[in-house]
Image (tube, rainbow, N blue to C red):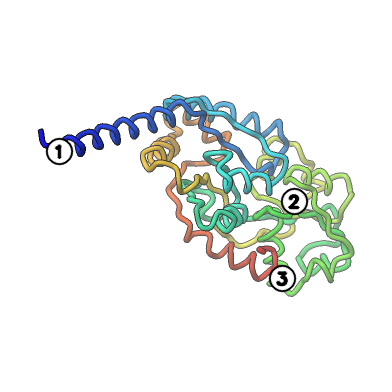
């Protein structure tokens, strides 16, 4: 065999070995996921446990759920590749995409996230519209929450109400369930939160709807998604997407997982879906 051919063969063999080794190393890695802490840590852990088990079966690798302290930590974890996948709201996805230089890839969203909404709640009889919030106290969720801050703020500004100028006080509860608790306890006159958490609290009878009620529901917008880093191998991205897209309420496992995720089913999504969120964030001065 000529020297040049032998060298080419050896290079090819070395390359194949390296690729094989790389995929083996990746397969031995732990697939780490996290989620923005938009609810209590116990609720997030309850929702994560069956999903971790399901993904381990589908991906053929160990999956680990890593809780984070706040929304910013979830954004940093994905941008810095400390986790492989994160459950983001629309705004945290936009933040992660900006922070990672356009390297955040939203894979799937719940069907509900194509037309997500926020609700404004109150226990005050005098509050029946956004205009009635003038001079009152209001709690948002986390400052980085899409459905608990960005979009409610955006719709308030659209109604010519500036939360920072027209309200007596604006608070941030940190999470949707904490906003319900603040309104129920009379700590604030009103609150803005994610409609699915509100509906779950009502269904579970965890809130007295004779006292606390919805007085405004926003128009629909795109929200939550499961996002990965662009550097993830394409084959693994496909496996992850397929795992979510194959979830069906027709199977006991699918029914449980979809119920926990408050989803009818998962559908593919793309970065372009969140351009409206990015525009709202920039116009509200919330995206640096």
Spot occupied by residue 159 in the image (x, y as percentages of width and height): 71, 72
Which quadrant is home to the N terminus? Answer: top left
Asked if 288 appears above or below 258 in the picture, the reply is below
Towards the viewer: 16 or 121: 16
Distance CA(mark 1)–CA(mark 2): 65 Å
Mark 1 falls on what kind of element? helix
x then y, percent, for residue 6 = 17, 34
Q: Residue at x 63, y 33 (%)?
A: 66
**Residue 165's spot in the image, x, y percent?**
84, 71
Q: Earlier in the sequence, mark 2 or mark 3?
A: 2
In the rendered view, tell whether residue 63 sits above or below residue 261: above
Q: Nearer the viewer, mark 1 or mark 3?
A: 1
Please tell me which of labels 1 and 3 falls first in the chain: 1
- Mark 1 vs mark 2: give the one in front: 1
Dot 3: within a 10 Å radius of its alpha carbon, few (fewer than 14), some, or many (20 or more) residues?
Answer: some
In the rendered structure, find residue 5 and report the number of the disc placed on it.
Answer: 1
Q: Residues within 10 Å of mark 2 (few under 14, many from 20)?
A: many
User: Does the rendering let one see residue 116?
Assistant: no
Residue 97: assigned label? none
* Residue sitting at x 38%, y 32%: 23
Residue at the farthest bottom position: 160
**In the rendered image, which residue does mark 2 sit on?**
141
Q: Which residue is mark 3?
A: 157
């Amino acid at each position: 065999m000529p020297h040049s051919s032998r060298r080419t063969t050896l290079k090819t063999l070395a390359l194949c070995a390296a690729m094989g080794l790389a995929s083996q190393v990746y397969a031995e890695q732990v697939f780490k996921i996290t989620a923005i802490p938009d609810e209590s840590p116990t609720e997030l852990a309850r929702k994560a446990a069956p999903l971790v088990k399901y993904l381990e079966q589908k991906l053929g690798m160990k999956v680990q759920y890593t809780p984070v302290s706040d929304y910013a930590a979830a954004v940093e974890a994905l941008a810095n590749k400390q986790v492989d996948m994160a459950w983001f709201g629309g705004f945290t996805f936009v933040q992660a995409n900006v922070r990672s230089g356009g390297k955040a890839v939203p894979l799937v969203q719940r069907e509900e996230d194509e037309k997500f909404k926020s609700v404004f709640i109150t226990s005050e009889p005098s509050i029946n519209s956004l205009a009635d919030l003038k001079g009152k106290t209001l709690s948002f969720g986390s400052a980085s929450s899409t459905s608990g801050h960005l979009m409610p703020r955006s719709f308030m500004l659209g109604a010519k109400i500036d939360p920072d100028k027209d309200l007596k006080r604006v608070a941030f509860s940190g999470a949707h369930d904490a906003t319900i608790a603040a309104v129920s306890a009379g700590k604030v006159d009103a609150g803005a939160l994610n409609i699915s958490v509100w509906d779950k609290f009502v269904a579970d009878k965890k809130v007295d709807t004779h006292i606390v009620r919805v007085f405004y529901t926003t128009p629909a917008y795109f929200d939550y998604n499961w996002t990965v880093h662009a550097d993830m191998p394409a084959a693994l991205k496909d496996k992850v997407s397929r795992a979510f897209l194959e979830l069906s309420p027709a199977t006991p496992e699918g029914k449980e997982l979809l119920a926990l995720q408050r989803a009818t089913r998962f559908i593919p999504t793309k970065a372009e879906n969140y351009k409206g969120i990015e525009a709202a964030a920039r116009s509200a001065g919330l995206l640096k």
